[in-house]
Amino acid sequence: MRFLTPLLLAPLIAMSCATGAAAQDSTSPPAGKSDIIVIGEANREQREQQVRAFVRDLTDTRGINPVARFDRNAVCPAAVGLTAEQDSAVTTRMRRVAAAAKIRLAVPGCRPNALVIFARDKQETVEALQREYPAYFLGRPGDDARPVELAKRPGPVVAWYVQDIVDRNGTSVPVDLELGYRILSEVNTPSRISPTTRPVIVASVVVIEYRALGGLTTTQVGDYAAMRAFTRADPGRLEQPGISTILTILDAPMGSDIPLTLTHWDLSYLRGYNAVSTDRFAPQQRAEIGKRMLRDLEGAAPPEK
C-alpha cells in the first residue's frame, strides 16, 4: 500500500482539526513481505563504537536524568488522517513493532496514547490541536521548546511527548500549584546510583505531513512512526552516517535507497530502550541499551518476524 495522490478526509478519533490527505491504494505487498526483517551488518571491528554513537544520538536525556518511556501504562497506538484502510494498516504495523520489541500493549479498542496524525500542514494542525486539546501540550519540565515552536522548524514531521514524574515506587509526584514544583510525599534517601524520581511518557503525538509520504508503504510509515512514538528518538540528532535505520526515510532524496522496513539496528534499539533499568541514571542506561543492542546484533537474540 503506497501513498500517492490527494484526497480530502474528515478527522478521526475525536480530533476536530479537519485536514486534507494524500492517499491512493495500490497492491499490498505479498504475504510475509511486510514482516520485520534484518537489513545490513556493520563491520564487527566498528560495531561497538557505532552502537555507542547510535544510542548516544537517539537517547534524549538531560544530563544524567533517566530516560522517559512507556513503562506505567500499556502502549495504545493509533493513526488518523488517511483512508480508514491506511490508518488501520499503520496502526496494525505499530502494534506489530511494539510486540516484536516486547513493549506492553493495550488491548485493541483502547484509548490511544501513541497518536500519529497525518496532515497537510503540521504547524496549522498543532495549533488547532492546542486549542482543542490542551492536555496534549503539557510537555515535560524544563523543555526548551513547546510543540507549537517545534512545529515551526523545517521538515515534514513534529513529535512531542506528554510526561509525568514518578518516584521510585512508580507513584506520580504531584505539583504544588502555589510553589510551582513537585514535592515527594515520602522521604527517599538520595543516592548516587539510583534516582529519586524519573520521567515516564504518558502520551506521544507525531504529526507527519502528506508531502513526506510519496512512494512510501504503510509498513515503512508505521515503522517510522513507531520509532518516533515509542521512544524520544529524533533522526535530526543522528550524527553518524552509514547506519541503516528507518528513521532516515523521510529525509532521503527521492529515488535513493531506503530501508523497506524496520532494520535490525532499529528493533535492537527499541528492545534495549524499553527494557532498560528504571533505577539507573542516563549514562548507565545508555550503556545498558548499548550492551543489549550488541548482543542482539551479534545474533544472540534474532528479531521476531
Image (tube, rainbow, N blue to C red):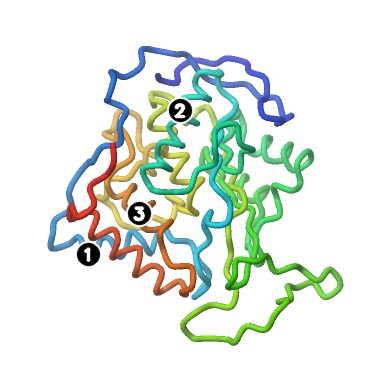
Q: How crowded is mark 1: few (under 14 residues within 10 Å), some or many (20 or more)?
A: some
What residue is shown at x 51% (from left), y 69% (from top)?
66
Which of the 4 quarters of the picture holds residue 100?
top left
State if disc 3 and disc 1 touch (CB < 8 Å): no
Q: Nearer the observer, disc 1 or disc 3?
A: 3
Q: Nearer the viewer, residue 200 or 122?
A: 200
The amino acid sitting under disc 2 is Leu
Residue receiving disc 2: 213
Q: Residues within 10 Å of mark 3 (few under 14, many from 20)?
A: many
- N-terminal-most mark, 1 or 3: 1
For label 1, the SS is helix
Which of the 4 quarters of the picture holds residue 35?
top left
Q: Distance between the Cα atoms at labels 1 and 2? A: 33 Å
Task: Residue 17 in the image: state x and y as whole percent.
Answer: 72, 29
Q: Point out the image quarter for the N terminus.
A: top left
For label 2, the SS is loop
The amino acid sitting under disc 3 is Tyr
- N-terminal-most mark, 1 or 2: 1
Residue receiving disc 3: 269
